[in-house]
Image: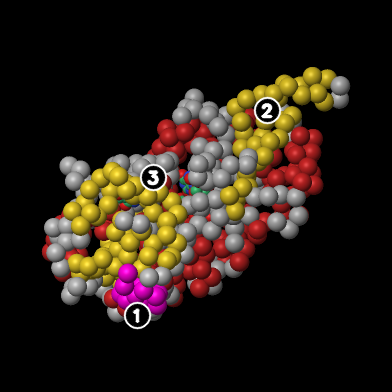
Amino acid sequence: MNSRILILDCGSQFTQLIARRVREARVYSEIHPPSKSLEWIRAWKPDGIILSGGPSSVTDADAPTISRALLDIAPVLGVCYGMQLIAHLEGGAVVGGGRREYGRAEVTIDEASGLFSGFAAGERTTVWMSHGDHVEQVPPGYVATAHSGHTLAGFRHTTRPIHAVQFHSEVAHTVRGAEIIQNFLFGVCGCTPDWTPGHFIDLEVAKIRELVGDKQVICGLSGGVDSSVAAALVHKAIGDQLTCIFVDTGLLRLHEREQVERTMRAHLGIKLITVRAEDRFLNGLAGEGDPEKKRKIIGHTFIDVFEDASAEAGQGAEFLVQGTLYPDVIESVSAKGGPSATIKTHHNVGGLKPDMKFRLIEPLRELFKDEVRNVGRELGLPEEMVGRHPFPGPGLAIRVLGEVTPYAVDILRRADAIYLEEIRAAGLYQEIWQAFAVFLPVRSVGVMGDGRTYEHVIALRAVTSTDGMTADWFSFPHDVLGRISNRIINEVDGVNRVVYDISSKPPATIEWE
Ligand SMILES: Nc1ncnc2c1ncn2[C@@H]1O[C@H](COP(=O)(O)OP(=O)(O)OP(=O)(O)O)[C@@H](O)[C@H]1O
Ligand SMILES: O=c1[nH]c(=O)c2[nH+]cn([C@@H]3O[C@H](COP(=O)(O)O)[C@@H](O)[C@H]3O)c2[nH]1
Ligand SMILES: NC(=O)CC[C@H](N)C(=O)O
Ligand SMILES: [Mg+2]
């Protein structure tokens, strides 16, 4: 069995980055809420446990907490709130106010061993902090391992394998953070670096086989990266018990249905049913302008369509496969039971129908996009599939701001096709994480052929990113932008102005709704 690390999520925005750092070190990990029972945790057999940061103070009434006995199940690493929680449970003193540290900080290493082996005693290193409370006094049996100014920045137990840092070792800005996490994994926990995308595939295949038995399974297949990889994985596990369902929502891009059908049939060799549900989606959305309500309508309609299609095909499928990724989960409701904020309800997570009949299979739920692409490559999927830009399930509906009308979708679809065509022609497609056009529900005045126009505005968005969690706007050569704008205004009736979005994520998001 592979080494495995259990990450207990106390609500930090960075919890997913801890998981990522662990995987990058080739160790398997899962994220779960701190409320998991001791029995469950023991049965999971962690080689180490990491307690994440979080927005609460340990003395808050409803602050996430753990049983003290958890500290003896496996070696523990506490990060930020996780460190404060250990201090609190073990009889140290955690106090609020006074020594807040946000952003860059310099930490001095007191003890060049444990988490800091490979460092020099007295060495200063740059880290990223984000805390208002601090540990005033180490608990009995613990010693300080690092400090920043007068504030404790790390401690460990003198005999038990319990370590903690006040800073965020998982973020890229903490210069030697990955090394600190690796010291925990390999030095403290004795993990073996043996987790690869190949192992991921074998593990998931075994899990899926056991779960499904001889039941029928359907997969929502969009032609996108995530669902194609999920479908290929499940197909590897259960062969023709799997039927894929591709839904034409009426919110797809120009000629997308034909393209997806062609590529899927050519490469996947999986049973594929196409359902045309344009009217169902567009009628369901009619008159609704609120982004969150739109997302929920779309999520529910997807499930209705899957249920009908499965019944019609005589499958009576019990399971639904979706290509859900970690960013879909973290941005939607706190699906892990953690106290993180809802940014937007992804149609495939928070937008699902509460009374749906299917049980979900989401083998990619813990991964980030670039990791999913690697799994896809390992499964032998062609680059034209794994290298595609993401396209959200709600499609053009969340790119027509406000109410979705067939008129707006049609304008957007044509503008978007020109945009992508020019990006490809300029050889920029692979440099960009995601590019798309947005239909703005405003009109502006223009002059065309000496006459006045009063028409719509198209916004262009293109971002670079590695995982979709943070993103920056793409710096286009001006001549390419000029060509795109010119073609859209000339070729798409109803548009007289094109603007380019220069916002990063955060504070903006990639999609406009
Ligand atoms: N048109 C569709 N037909 C069937 N299922 C869909 C459709 N659009 C989305 N889904 C389901 O919703 C999931 C989430 O969509 P999402 O867009 O995040 O992933 P994707 O389309 O598989 O990959 P990508 O992010 O590369 O577009 C998909 O993995 C798929 O299971
Ligand atoms: O399948 C999906 N269903 C959704 O409801 C959804 N909302 C956003 N996205 C995609 O997620 C990534 C991050 O987007 P945001 O920065 O806009 O949150 C980007 O790649 C978005 O395109 C979605 N994908
Ligand atoms: N990022 C964190 O984990 C913060 C923990 C705690 N709420 C503090 O401000 O100190
Ligand atoms: Mg998609």
Q: From the viewer's side, name the closer residue of 386 and 65.
A: 65
| Category of crowding for the residue at label 1, using alpha-carbon neighbours closer than 10 angstroms: few (below 14), some (14–19), many (at least 20) | some
Q: Which mark is residue 30?
A: none
Residue to which mark 1 is pinned:
192
Is 106 located above or below residue 48 in the figure? above
**Residue 72, percent across and down?**
16, 69
The answer to whether mark 2 is within 8 Å of ligand 2 is no
From which residue to which does the magenta span run? Answer: 110-121
* Residue drawn at 82 percent across, 25 percent down: 448
Amino acid of disc 3: Ser
How many residues crowd around disc 3 within 10 Å: few (fewer than 14), some, or many (20 or more)? many
In which quarter of the view is residue 265 placed?
Answer: bottom right
* Circle 3 residue: 332
Q: Distance between the residues labelled 2 and 1?
A: 58 Å
Q: Is residue 228 visible?
A: no
Label pair 1/3, CB-CB below 8 angstroms: no
The mark found on residue 456 in the picture is 2
Disc 2, SS? strand
Looking at the rendered structure, the kind of residue marked 2 is His
